[in-house]
Image (cartoon, rainbow, N blue to C red):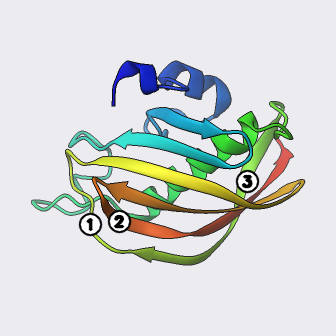
Amino acid sequence: MTEENVVFDHSQIMEILPHRYPFLMVDKVIHFEDAKKIIAIKNVTHNEFYFPGHFPGKPVMPGVMILEAMAQTGAIFAKKSFDSVAYDKLFYFVGVKDLKWKRPVFPGDVLRIEMQAERVRRPLWAMSGAVYVGDKVVASGALSAAEGDK
């Protein structure tokens, strides 16, 4: 991906999400269709905080961190869409359905996180999506989140 594909860069993402190192799981957004679809990128480096313990000598990104990247991508989507979640609210992850992990993720992989809106009935957002490394699906499923007070 080239720089002209960047819709929201790292500093803009930090204005949208409250997450910070070591828990910010989205590096940039490369595609955004208002209230329809978002595509984000997470560069997985060997410096991630979880690799020393998961697993020593064979680093594998924990599945829950892949799920967190999906949830954060969904939060960016909800905060930037037309009927957006207010900036003075947090976006709480409230459910997951049919999540499947298909392949392991290793240091050096680049995650492409694609999320689509399924149903929006504020304050609840239901989304589905998949995470890819190259053209291979590493995870897919549906999740829901709701806006709430900070």
**Residue 25 can be seen, yes or no:** no
Sequence-wise, the earlier of marks 3 and 2 is 3
Q: Quadrant of the C terminus?
A: top right
Residue 76 is situated, as x and y percent measured from the top left of the image, at 64, 39
Bin the neighbour count of mark 3 within 10 Å (Cα to Cα): few under 14, some 14-19, many 20 and up: some
Callout 3 amino acid: Tyr
Q: Earlier in the sequence, mark 2 or mark 1?
A: 1
Q: Which residue is mark 1?
A: 104
Quadrant position of residue 115: bottom right
Residue topped by disc 2: 138
**What residue do we see at 35% from left, 62% from top?**
62
Name the residue at the right extreme: 122
68 vs 139, nearest the viewer: 139
Q: CA distance from mark 3 to mark 1?
A: 26 Å
**Residue with the most extreme bottom position:** 98
Mark 3 or mark 1, which has the lower sequence index? Answer: 3
How far across and down, in percent of the image, does residue 89 sit?
82, 38
Residue placed under numbered mark 3 in the picture: 92
Write the residue at 73% across / 44% down.
78
Nearer to us: label 3 or label 1: 1
Task: Determine if residue 117 is in view.
Answer: yes
**In the image, residue 142 lies at what x, y percent?**
61, 69
Q: Label 2 sits on what residue type? A: Val
Q: Seen in the image, is 113 located left or right of residue 93? A: left
Nearest-to-viewer mark from 3 and 2 = 2
CA gap, disc 3 to disc 2? 24 Å
Quarter holding the N terminus is top left
Q: CA distance from mark 2 to mark 1?
A: 7 Å
Dots 2, 1 in contact, CB < 8 A: yes
Residue drawn at point x = 38 percent, y = 20 percent: 3
Which label belongs to residue 16?
Answer: none
